[in-house]
């Protein structure tokens, strides 16, 4: 059986992302929200979606979700941010929204996927030669990481 993939034009793609975001925001069912958030995060791998994601303030939403208790929400949010952080315009949004601290706190998370995505996001950001980033800030993040790993090794 031959599969047909529907190709969305820019307006359709924006509308679809907008509908997904609306569904995430209004749903009361946590499992449905998790599935929609996973869907939204999956759109972050493709640069064709970056402008739409910025228009919908999805980067800020992902950053806000890094501090919730639901670990899957955190995992999907940091994964989306990791993919988005390859683009300088997205990095600018992250920095302007004070997202670096939120990303750094994910380094201490017990979930390895969250840790790796946070570290990769920080690497992407620092590779952008961004003057808005204070090197001392990252030193403190990595000292935090060292402390987190030290605590982990004492539990083993």
Image: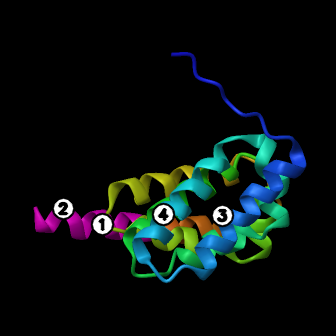
Q: Earlier in the sequence, mark 2 or mark 3?
A: 3
User: Which mark, by number, is residue 110?
Assistant: 1
Q: Nearer the viewer, residue 127 or 51?
A: 51
Q: Name the residue under label 3.
A: 20
Of the residues tagged 4 and 3, which is closer to the observer? 3
Asked if residue 118 can be seen in this view, the reply is yes
Prevalent SS, magenta region: helix
Q: Provide residue 94's location: percent of width, then percent of height.
A: 73, 67
The alpha-carbon separation of the residues under discs 1 and 2 comes to: 12 Å
How far separated are the C-alphas under marks 4 and 2? Answer: 16 Å
Range of residues picked out in magenta = 143-156
Residue where numbered disc 2 is placed? 153
Mark closer to the observer (3, 1): 3
Within the magenta stretch, is there residue 85?
Answer: no
- Element class at badge 4: helix
Q: Which label number is shown at residue 15?
A: none
Indicate yes or no whether the magenta region holds residue 148: yes
Q: Mark 4 points at which residue?
A: 142
> Nearer the observer, disc 1 or disc 2?
1
Q: Is mark 2 on a helix, strand or loop?
A: helix
Earlier residue among tags 1 and 2: 1
Instruction: Point out the tag, 4 or 2, that comes first from the N-terminus.
Output: 4
Residue 2 position (above or below residue 19): above
Vertical arrangement, residue 80 with respect to residue 73, above or below: above
């Amino acid at each position: 059986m031959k599969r047909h993939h529907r190709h969305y034009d820019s307006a359709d793609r924006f509308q679809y992302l907008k509908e997904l975001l609306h569904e995430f925001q209004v749903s009361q069912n946590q499992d449905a929200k998790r599935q929609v958030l996973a869907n939204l995060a999956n759109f972050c791998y493709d640069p064709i979606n970056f402008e739409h994601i910025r228009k919908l303030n999805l980067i800020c939403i992902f950053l806000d979700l890094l501090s919730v208790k639901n670990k899957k929400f955190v995992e999907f949010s940091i994964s989306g941010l990791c993919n988005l952080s390859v683009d300088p315009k997205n990095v600018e949004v992250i920095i302007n929204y004070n997202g670096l601290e939120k990303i750094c706190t994910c380094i201490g998370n017990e979930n390895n996927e969250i840790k790796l995505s946070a570290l990769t996001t920080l690497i992407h950001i620092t590779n952008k030669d961004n003057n808005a980033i204070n090197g001392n800030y990252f030193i403190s993040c990595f000292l935090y990481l060292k402390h987190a790993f030290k605590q982990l090794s004492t539990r083993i």
